[in-house]
């Protein structure tokens, strides 16, 4: 079974020999080779530089043995095409946060293939390269709620209280913004699939900040609409929410192929809830990559055992790989996944 088959089968809940493995933020600052390519260039310029973006996307394959490639970019790349002035210092900072209906109505509604053509050039180039390695190519987008968190707040925040205030006091503005971002996200992900992405992940990092009722009102309908509007025959959908233990049922209800979960919840319980409806992805705490190799192996075996209750399981972290992660910890993580196919005596 090659890596592409294993990955796609796990997403769709078909039998596999063992779970495939990759990491969120697997191409990043923990790799000296990434830092070398990134040197002397601004982050957003690097996202536009097809050659460098392709190079760092591929680095984790050889360097740490991951089994899927996510293209190098950021969730804010397509937002620039809507006329939003945003920079990274080092996190995203919006020049003029969106706080009025007029500002939302002024947003452009571009075809992403025209506003960010380099994204699709990166994907097409990677797909050609990855065919040789029989390795799947993943596309991604930020989910509308998470994008809105930053666009309204203006930057990262612990509680995104400006966004939450808008939700309660000026719901029409937030509704209009989510509407625009949802249309953009659907067009953007479908264009990625057209350019060669074999699965796509929707990152709703901050949706877990909401109480279940608010999540059902503000987030679930958006996820449902995206899930229903993508070319799922060609690419399964993975839905990620950080700190979403209280909304696992709602994540499943949205109808993705895979729900991607963090380390704060019991994976076996989530697997049982998902039943035949969705596969699961996760969920090692990224800081556990600092542990000794044997401990990482032990934890991967435990996660795989919990994941075995699901119709399919993709091994991953519960959130992105941190910049201070030891490379040998990441290598141990992917080696541990491969060791799952071996008989217990040889472990
Ligand atoms: O997973 C991958 O390897 C694919 C590429 C990817 C990046 N960011 C690269 C990146 C993806 C899928 C993201 C998603 C992303 N970006 C999210 C959602 C998932 C999550 O991690 O919660 C969010 C909220 C962002 C916004 C973002 N981008 C922040 C807050 C930051 C700065 C934080 C930091 O670590 O300094 C970024 C920058 C960023 N995006 C880097 C990378 C590799 C670091 C850039 C650098 O300085 O080299």
Image: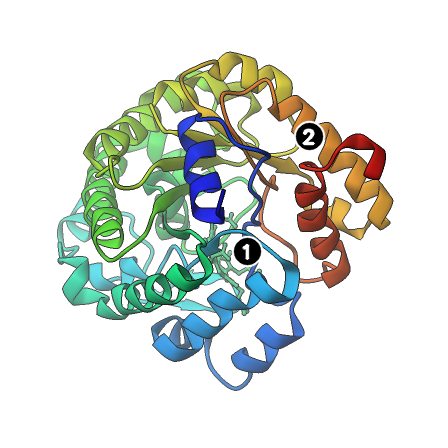
Of residues 81 and 63, the one nearer the viewer is: 63
Look at the numbered disc 1 and give the secondary structure of its residue.
Answer: loop
Ligand 1 is within 8 Å of the C-beta of the residue at disc 2: no
Ligand 1 is within 8 Å of the C-beta of the residue at disc 1: yes
- Residue at left offset 50%, top offset 27%: 312
Q: Is residue 158 above or below residue 25?
A: above
Q: Name the side, left or right, on which 166 lies relative to 187.
A: right
Q: Position of residue 158 (x, y in %)?
A: 57, 44
The residue indicated by pointer 1 is: 25
Q: Name the side, left or right, on which 198 lies relative to 319.
A: left
Total count of labels: 2
How many other residues sit within 10 Å of disc 2, few (<14), some (14-19) or many (≥20)? many
Residue 199, image quadrant: top left
Q: Nearer the viewer, mark 1 or mark 2?
A: 2
Residue 274 appears in the rendering: yes
The residue indicated by pointer 2 is: 303
């Amino acid at each position: 079974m090659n890596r592409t088959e294993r990955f796609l089968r796990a997403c769709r809940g078909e039998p596999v020999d063992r779970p495939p493995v990759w990491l969120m933020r697997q191409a990043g600052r923990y790799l000296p080779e990434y830092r070398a390519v990134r040197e002397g260039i601004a982050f957003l310029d690097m996202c536009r530089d097809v050659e460098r973006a392709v190079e760092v996307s591929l680095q984790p394959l050889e360097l740490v043995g991951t089994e899927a490639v996510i293209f190098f970019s950021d969730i804010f790349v397509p937002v620039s095409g809507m006329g939003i002035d945003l920079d990274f210092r080092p996190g995203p900072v919006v020049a003029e946060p969106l706080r009025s209906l007029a500002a939302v109505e002024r947003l452009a509604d571009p075809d992403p293939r025209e506003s960010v053509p380099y994204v699709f050039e990166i994907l097409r180039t990677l797909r050609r390269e990855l065919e040789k390695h029989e390795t799947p190519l993943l596309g991604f987008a930020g989910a509308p709620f998470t994008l809105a968190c930053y666009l309204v707040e203006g930057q990262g925040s612990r509680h995104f209280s400006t966004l939450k205030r808008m939700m309660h006091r000026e719901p029409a503005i937030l509704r209009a913004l989510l509407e625009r971002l949802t249309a953009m996200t659907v067009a953007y992900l479908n264009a990625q699939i057209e350019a060669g992405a074999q699965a796509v992940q929707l990152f709703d990092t901050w949706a877990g900040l909401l109480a279940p009722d608010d999540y059902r009102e503000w987030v679930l309908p958006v996820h449902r609409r995206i899930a229903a509007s993508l070319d799922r025959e060609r690419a399964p959908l993975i839905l990620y929410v950080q700190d979403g233990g209280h909304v696992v049922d709602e994540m499943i209800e949205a109808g993705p192929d895979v729900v991607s979960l963090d380390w704060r919840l019991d994976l076996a319980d989530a697997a049982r809830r998902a039943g035949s409806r969705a596969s699961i992805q996760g969920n090692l705490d990224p800081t556990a990559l600092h542990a000794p190799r044997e401990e990482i192996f032990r934890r991967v075996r435990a996660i795989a055992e919990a994941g075995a209750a699901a119709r399919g399981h993709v091994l991953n972290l519960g959130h992105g790989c941190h910049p201070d992660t030891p490379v040998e910890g990441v290598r141990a993580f992917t080696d541990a996944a491969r060791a799952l196919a071996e008989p217990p005596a040889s472990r």
